[in-house]
Structure formats: C-alpha cells, structure tokens
Image (cartoon, coloured by chain):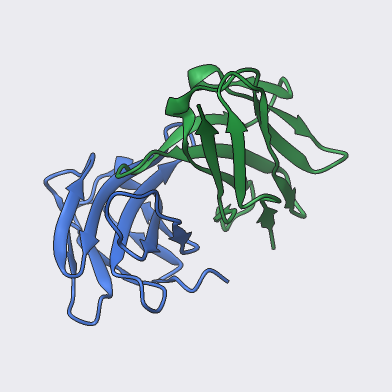
Chain colours: A green, B blue
Amino acid sequence: AQSVTQLDSQVPVFEEAPVELRCNYSSSVSVYLFWYVQYPNQGLQLLLKYLSGSTLVKGINGFEAEFNKSQTSFHLRKPSVHISDTAEYFCAVGSSGSARQLTFGSGTQLTVLP
Amino acid sequence: DSGVTQTPKHLITATGQRVTLRCSPRSGDLSVYWYQQSLDQGLQFLIQYYNGEERAKGNILERFSAQQFPDLHSELNLSSLELGDSALYFCASSAGNRGRVEKLFFGSGTQLSVL
C-alpha cells in the first residue's frame, strides 16, 4: 500500500517570497512522484514528475522539487512566487508494481498575497 | 479513504470493444471529474459534470462519453478501444462551488488494459 501526506492544507505567502509545499509518501516499492496544480475553475495540470535519474526535478512556471528517498519526501519549491501561483497543489505517488495505482495527497491551497 | 469509489479497479479488454467505468462521488459532492493518467503524459483532464450536467470539457476523444445520473454517480464510456487507450482513469469529486478553488477528492482509479 502507498500513501501521500501533504503536511499543510493552506499556505499563505507574500508575493515575491519563496515557498515550499511539503509532501511525504510511503510505499513498499519503487515510486514515481508527481506534483499537480489546479487553478480556479480549471482541471489539474502536471507541474513536474520524478520517474528516475536526477533527484532535483524542474517543472513549469519556475517550480522545482527534490526527491529525497531517505526522508521519503518530495517537497515542491519556488524561489519567488507571483499572485498567479495562487492555486491548489496536489502531490501524488505511483508505484511500479502491477497494480499501478496513483495515490493523491489531500492538496495544499497556496494563496499569494500582494 | 477519500470517499470516492471507482469500479472496477482493473479492466482488461480487446481492441474495438466498449467499456464503462463507474464513479461514486463523495457524499454531498455535486461535481465529478474524469481524468486519464499515463506515465509519460501525466494526468489529462477529460470532462467535468455538475449535478447531472456537463460543466467543462477537456481532452476527451469523440469515442469517449460520460454522464452523471440523478443519484450523482457518473459513468465514463469508452468505445472502439485502441491500444493507446490503455491508461489509469481517475474520477474526482468536489462540492461544486463556482468561483473558488475547490478541494478535489480522488478515487483510486481504474486501470484499463487494451490488448
């Protein structure tokens, strides 16, 4: 079984400040990790993903995430946020096992304040 | 447990066939979303229903259709299946309030394998 924990349900931050959205996972097999973003009145879109290779993954809109196997974490970071980054962010973990299920975290609401 | 139920968990079928995926949203949620997940493309938004009516449409093929019933459960119908339709299909639900970012609750997905 696998699970995902997004430690913060809401993160308010001022414009141009750095932000980190935390994600921890548990899985008994090799994992794939994703961050998705949902803007108001839109469906989810992929920010970035880790499948293998370099543990530092760069995504769209200036976001990046680091896969830390020892800490079972995949935190999302951006050095300077904009008002337009206000959205809901989901971390998800998929396994390489036969079931190929994808488990989503509960989401983190990022609100960028002027 | 998100409260969103998807059945079946796994489905194996042949090209040219038709299948139906089912989703029961969280109690009280009026909106249902369907997504297709492939490892290389990530999650693709297909379609959204709100209280029985289509609200938004994404990258849904003409061979695919969906509906939401009066009891709010939803079905995604995939026809004339092709090998490339093999993917993980997710359903999500939300309360359905317009004009605000809604928290989504995801089912565990249906793994479709087209052979």
Query: Could you say which quadrant of the image residue A103 lies in?
Result: bottom right
Query: Could you say which quadrant of the image residue B12 lies in?
Result: bottom left
Q: Where residue B27 appears, x then y in whole percent? A: 40, 79
Q: Where residue B15 appears, x then y in whole percent? A: 24, 51
Query: Can see residue A21?
Result: yes
| Front-most of residues A87 and A34 | A87
Q: Residue at x 46, y 67 (%)?
A: B9
Q: Residue at x 61, y 33 (%)?
A: A13
Q: Residue at x 23, y 39 (%)?
A: B59
Residue A43 vs residue B54: left or right? right
Name of the residue lying farthest toward the front: A114
Q: Where residue B29 appears, x then y in whole percent? A: 35, 71
| Front-most of residues A7 and B34 | A7
Quarter holding the N terminus of chain B is bottom right
**Above or below: residue A79 compared with residue A48:** above
**Above or below: residue A42 compared with residue B51:** above
**Above or below: residue B70 compared with residue A41:** below
Q: Where residue A20 appears, x then y in whole percent? A: 69, 32
Residue A31 vs residue B30: left or right? right
